Amino acid sequence: MLALTWAAALPAPAQPVHELPPPAAARALASHGQPFGELMKQAMATMDRDMAAAPMNGDADHDFAAMMIPHHQGAIDMARAVLLYGKNPVLRRLAQEIIVTQGSEIVVLRAELDPSAARAARTAAPQR
């Protein structure tokens, strides 16, 4: 519930999280062409590679945000694989929540890395 309340307090992104173009790893999860285990391995490999390549500058806040973005994207990619293959309703619901909450958290992390982009997104967002 905290995540939903927290996410609701965020400014609306210029483009909703679910409409952002998916990264290559997420596009690979779009079909049943690969077994579940292979999708999970690919998600982990992509996450590990992207975390290792995150732009670090020694500032704890910056480095945390830079590394959490690919970490969260890895969780989203794994959750999508579970939605393709999983049958357990509890785990499927958890996977859906991971996609929504961690997607919202990626928006926040990106905004913290580039505050000017966050201001522009708030300015461009329609007023409700």
Image (cartoon, rainbow, N blue to C red):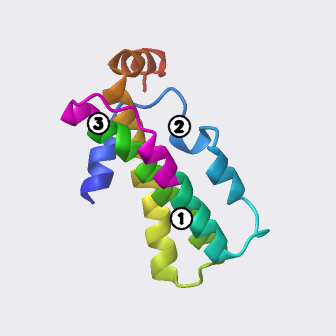
Q: Residue at x 69, y 51 (%)?
A: 27
Q: Distance between the residues labelled 3 and 1?
A: 23 Å
> What residue is disc 3 on?
63
Helix, strand or loop at mark 3: helix
Q: If the image is split into quadrants, where does the C terminus sit? A: top left
Who is closer to the viewer here, 122 or 91? 91
Q: Residues within 10 Å of mark 1 (few under 14, many from 20)?
A: many
Q: In this view, does 68 lie to the left or right of 41?
A: left
Q: Is 55 contained in the magenta span?
A: yes
Q: Position of residue 117 (x, y in %)?
A: 42, 19
Q: Residues within 10 Å of mark 2 (few under 14, many from 20)?
A: few
Q: How far apart are marks 2 and 3 (CA)?
A: 25 Å
Magenta extent: 47-63
Q: Residues within 10 Å of mark 3 (few under 14, many from 20)?
A: some
Q: Compared with residue 77, is residue 110 higher up or lower down, i.e. above or below?
A: above
Q: Is 25 contained in the magenta span?
A: no
> What residue is disc 1 on?
78
